[in-house]
């Protein structure tokens, strides 16, 4: 006898000795026992009965009996691992439920196809994790237009009758036992709704009335049986209800509340030892599942890779994504497998849906069934796993805000002690919130959430650099919100986020305005990675391009706007929080913009081609210029773009509605610009400036590469060649980009009109100074000696000497300094002025001196010791630039 056969024989012996239920099945199924060594490898197939004459109800019961025996012996023998066992049990439940639906419809309307009614599996069936003796928790929905019914029946009544018959076929007990216990109480409002719901009514409920815990339930939802197209369409429709980009800590608190209530209600089963509730006890199965679901709800709205139903898969996905600690994930996974395995042993004894460890001799029986000597050995095996799960799950209380801090009275003395210089003014604002001054604060839940969040929030604002400014900006945000419920839930749950918000509100009106338009931007900051540099363009584009079943072009536009908004907001916060160099943030802004352009241009080109085809041997190429071309944007930068196309301008597209190449690409470019600039439900994206194209605003939006080259070589002005020094392709094939780069290099290196570049640049700078003066005394861009003067000096030298060409100003400055054409001091001046510009766009966009607290932030951002050092450095670097520009202009 081989090792596997020996293990199977030993499993049968243990089953006969210690499990009355399995012993009974062994006696009832001698033919299956004869081939059990083969059957345990595929219990689902081994359970099937191919006998069309056998009534459906009896066939399903006999098949379930066989499945129960083969799966149990395979489990006990170690032939089947935990995942295989639960998947097999779930697959059988799907099969039986599907057969019952088809049978019930056929009985009602003979010969009718099983359409128009679907079972949505929730719970462990939905995640393919069904336990050995479990009920199933489906939601039954029907489509009135397609459900077969008798002529004299109202379709809704027919649906209910069919649903009742499904339950009867599965659940009714007879001499052959039963198939599955069916629990329909997870449907919407089960106390008042029929057991089978119209699809539209179910959708309406989940989109408008569903309770918070129902979101968590749908993490594991699956179209399991019946009309699969109907079921999947329903799930696709309500997906935004389950996975929300805007966090709802009310839902997460509700899950934690359910866990606490379970502990309180099942008090006896909380004490570890004999009688311990493996499912509901502290450190039990439910707490592993809730731990995974809480983190899925927090992060899954933004990361579809976390939307996996099975608990072990969810823990692995959360670990791989860095959302939970790897050691915790491994600990929880190991505990989950052991706890569920022992739960199976407990249920195998009498086929009862129980989760509690028995006591006395009964515990010894469970232990022996698992291969141990006695109940004490089983307790010792479980104890470290249960204790580890309990400690990990209890730590969530500190993550979601805890409940131990005493409330801070929001009255004048307390406000003064908290750090407010004018506590009376602060108290008036807060009392206005309490009075329901704003629509967002008028509901009872919003008021309750606000009161819970106020103590830590007011404490954080009071300790912020400018409490009065922060509170006033928060008031503005609240005045514009349709609902403040989630905001306050989030701030209560994440005290560290409240402190970061207070810092943002103290310093950055630009970011506060962004929050007032989209308060969910704050959600992205719960992940510590939000304060790390953003990824490269390819990584960002992958995140923006991520699409799910049913997503259309409009949803992509919204998704890109959501991601860009979150990334830009987080980049700005990095400066305010003092964790990133503004130069790196500036580069991050540019990478985000390039990724957005790439994704939207690709999708727009593809959508346009569906109608108009492609122009043969031709493509769209997009050039970035200015700060975008140089890869260094600010929070408020627009995108300077030129649109070109390669190939024959006389060609025609090959689609159903063909267009000439010029018309084709001009219409296509207009659509790309709209994709980048038109505000959608998710807000605005970027302003696009195309005035640097050939002939400026008077010329066509798109020209051929040949036309572009001819214009630059013959007709372009000096300022256009200056702009070309920072031009780079940000969209197009490698070949298309290379062709454009060749033209640009030839023009810059001398294939252009011979002009007095220095004289023309000097006149242009004077005209610009007259028409566009500095905004304020701290305008690092437009002040004399600012970044514009620096750019004019660099670009003039590049064109005059035909050297030092690089799209990044730092690289160009270094090359020119290396050729002794520019002072090396211009490099540090560029860095200082750029840091100043990027920071001021956030904290003082009017370029006026900010308050004392924000001055310290600016000093940190630009690497100065204090505000006086900032002003001294600004003057010194402006003098360096002014001197360099003057030298160029005189040459």
Image (spheres, rainbow, N blue to C red):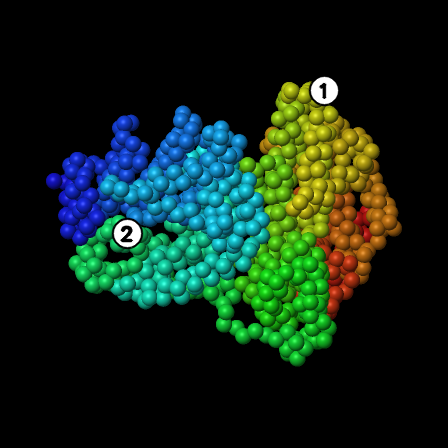
Q: Is residue 710 above or below residue 559?
A: above
Q: Secondary structure at mark 1?
A: loop
The answer to whether residue 831 is left or right of residue 226 is right
Q: Are marks 2 and 1 in contact (CB under 8 Å)?
A: no
* Separation of marks 2 and 1 at Cα, in angstroms: 79 Å
The answer to whether residue 673 is left or right of residue 276 is right
Q: Which quarter of the image is occupied by the N terminus?
A: top left
Quick one: 181 or 730, which is closer to the camera? Answer: 181
Q: Which residue is mark 1?
A: 650
CA neighbours of label 1 inside 10 A, class few (<14), some (14 to 19), many (20+): few
Give the residue furthest to the left.
1
The structure residue drawn at horizontal position 56% and vertical position 54%, both measured from the top left corner, is 247
Q: Position of residue 451 (x, y in %)?
A: 60, 68
The answer to whether residue 637 is left or right of residue 137 is right
Can you see residue 839?
no
Can you tell which mark lies on residue 352?
2
Q: Secondary structure at mark 2?
A: loop
Can you see residue 311?
yes
Q: Quadrant of residue 42?
A: top left
CA neighbours of label 2 inside 10 A, class few (<14), some (14 to 19), many (20+): few
The structure residue drawn at horizontal position 28% and vertical position 46%, both measured from the top left corner, is 81
Q: Quadrant of residue 274?
A: bottom left
The answer to whether residue 163 is left or right of residue 30 is right
The structure residue drawn at horizontal position 52% and vertical position 54%, both measured from the top left corner, is 212
Q: Is residue 881 above or below residue 35?
A: below
Q: Position of residue 125 (x, y in %)?
A: 38, 45
Disc with the residue nearer the chain's start (2 vs 1): 2
């Amino acid at each position: 006898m081989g090792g596997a056969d020996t293990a199977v024989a030993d499993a049968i012996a243990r089953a006969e000795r210690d499990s009355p239920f399995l012993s009974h099945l062994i006696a009832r199924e001698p033919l299956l026992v004869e081939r059990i060594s083969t059957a345990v490898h595929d219990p689902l197939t081994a359970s099937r009965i191919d006998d069309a004459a056998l009534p459906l109800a009896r066939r399903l019961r006999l098949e379930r009996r066989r499945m129960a025996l083969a799966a149990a012996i395979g489990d006990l023998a170690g032939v089947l691992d935990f995942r295989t066992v639960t998947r097999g049990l779930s697959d059988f439940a799907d099969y039986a439920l599907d057969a019952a639906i088809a049978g019930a419809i056929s009985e009602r309307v003979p010969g009718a196809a099983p359409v128009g009614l679907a079972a949505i599996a929730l719970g462990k069936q939905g995640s393919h994790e069904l336990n050995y003796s479990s009920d199933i928790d489906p939601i039954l929905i029907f489509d009135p237009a397609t459900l077969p019914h008798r002529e004299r029946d109202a379709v809704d009544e027919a649906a209910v009758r069919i649903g009742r018959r499904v339950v009867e076929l599965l659940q009714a007990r007879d001499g052959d036992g039963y198939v599955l216990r069916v629990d329909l109480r997870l449907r919407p409002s089960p106390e008042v709704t029929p057991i089978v719901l119209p699809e539209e009514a179910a959708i309406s409920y989940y989109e408008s009335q569903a309770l918070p815990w129902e979101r968590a339930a749908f993490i594991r939802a699956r179209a399991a049986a019946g009309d699969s197209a109907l079921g999947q369409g329903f799930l696709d429709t309500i997906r935004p209800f389950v996975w929300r980009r805007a966090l709802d800590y009310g839902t997460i608190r509700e899950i934690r509340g359910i866990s606490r209530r379970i502990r309180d209600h099942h008090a006896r089963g909380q004490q570890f030892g004999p009688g311990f509730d493996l499912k509901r006890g502290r450190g039990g199965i439910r707490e592993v599942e809730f731990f995974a679901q809480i983190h899925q709800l927090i992060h899954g709205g933004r990361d579809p890779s976390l939307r996996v139903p099975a608990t072990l898969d969810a823990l692995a996905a959360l670990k791989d994504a860095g959302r939970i600690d790897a050691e915790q994930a491994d600990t929880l996974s190991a505990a989950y497998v052991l706890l569920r395995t022992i739960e199976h042993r407990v249920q195998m004894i009498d086929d009862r849906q129980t989760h509690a460890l028995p006591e006395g001799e009964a515990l010894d029986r469970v232990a022996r069934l698992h291969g141990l000597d006695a109940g004490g050995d089983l307790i010792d095996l479980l104890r470290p796993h249960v204790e580890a799960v309990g400690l990990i799950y209890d730590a969530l209380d500190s993550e979601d805000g805890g409940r131990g801090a005493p409330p801070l009275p929001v009255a004048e003395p307390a406000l003064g002690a908290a750090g407010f210089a004018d506590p009376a003014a602060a108290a008036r604002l807060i009392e206005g919130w309490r009075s329901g001054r704003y629509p967002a604060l008028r509901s009872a839940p919003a008021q309750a959430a606000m009161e819970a969040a106020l103590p830590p929030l007011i404490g954080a604002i009071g300790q912020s650099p400018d409490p009065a400014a922060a509170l006033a900006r928060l008031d503005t945000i609240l005045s514009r919100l349709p609902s403040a419920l989630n905001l306050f839930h989030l701030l209560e749950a994440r005290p560290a986020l409240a402190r970061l918000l207070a810092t943002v509100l103290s310093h950055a009106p630009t970011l506060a305005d962004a929050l007032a338009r989209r308060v969910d931007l704050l959600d992205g900051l719960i992940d510590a990675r939000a304060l790390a540099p953003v990824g490269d363009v390819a990584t960002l584009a992958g995140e923006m391009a991520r699409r799910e079943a049913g997503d259309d072009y409009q949803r992509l536009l919204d998704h890109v706007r959501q991601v860009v908004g979150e990334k830009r907001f987080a980049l700005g916060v990095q400066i305010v929080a003092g964790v990133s160099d503004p130069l790196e943030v500036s580069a991050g802004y540019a990478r985000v913009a390039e990724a957005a352009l790439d994704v939207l241009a690709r999708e727009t080109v593809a959508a346009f081609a569906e109608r108009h085809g492609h122009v043969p041997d031709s493509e769209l190429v997009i050039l970035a210029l200015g700060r975008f071309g140089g890869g260094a944007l600010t929070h408020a930068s627009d995108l300077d773009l030129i649109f070109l196309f390669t190939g024959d301008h006389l060609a025609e597209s090959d689609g159903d509605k063909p267009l000439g190449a010029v018309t084709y690409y001009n219409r296509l470019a207009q659509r790309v610009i709209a994709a980048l600039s038109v505000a959608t439900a998710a807000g605005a994206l970027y302003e696009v400036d195309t005035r640097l194209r050939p002939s400026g605003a008077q010329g066509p939006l798109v020209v051929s590469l040949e036309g572009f080259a001819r214009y630059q070589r013959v007709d372009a002005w000096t300022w256009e060649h200056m702009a070309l020094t920072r031009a780079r392709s940000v969209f197009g094939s490698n070949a298309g980009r290379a062709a454009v780069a060749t033209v640009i290099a030839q023009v810059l290196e001398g294939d252009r009109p011979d002009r007095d570049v220095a004289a023309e640049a000097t006149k242009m700078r004077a005209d610009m100074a007259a028409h566009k003066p500095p905004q304020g005394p701290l305008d690092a861009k437009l002040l004399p000696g600012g970044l514009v003067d620096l750019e004019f000096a660099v670009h003039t030298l590049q064109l005059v000497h035909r050297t030092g060409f690089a799209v990044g100003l730092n690289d160009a400055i270094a090359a020119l300094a290396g050729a002794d054409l520019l002072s090396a001091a211009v490099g540090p001046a560029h860095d200082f002025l750029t840091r100043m510009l990027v920071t001021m766009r956030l904290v003082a966009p009017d370029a006026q001196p900010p308050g004392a607290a924000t001055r310290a932030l600016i000093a940190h951002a630009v690497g100065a010791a204090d505000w006086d050092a900032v002003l001294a450095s600004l003057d010194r670097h402006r003098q360096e630039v002014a001197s360099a520009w003057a030298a160029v202009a005189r040459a």
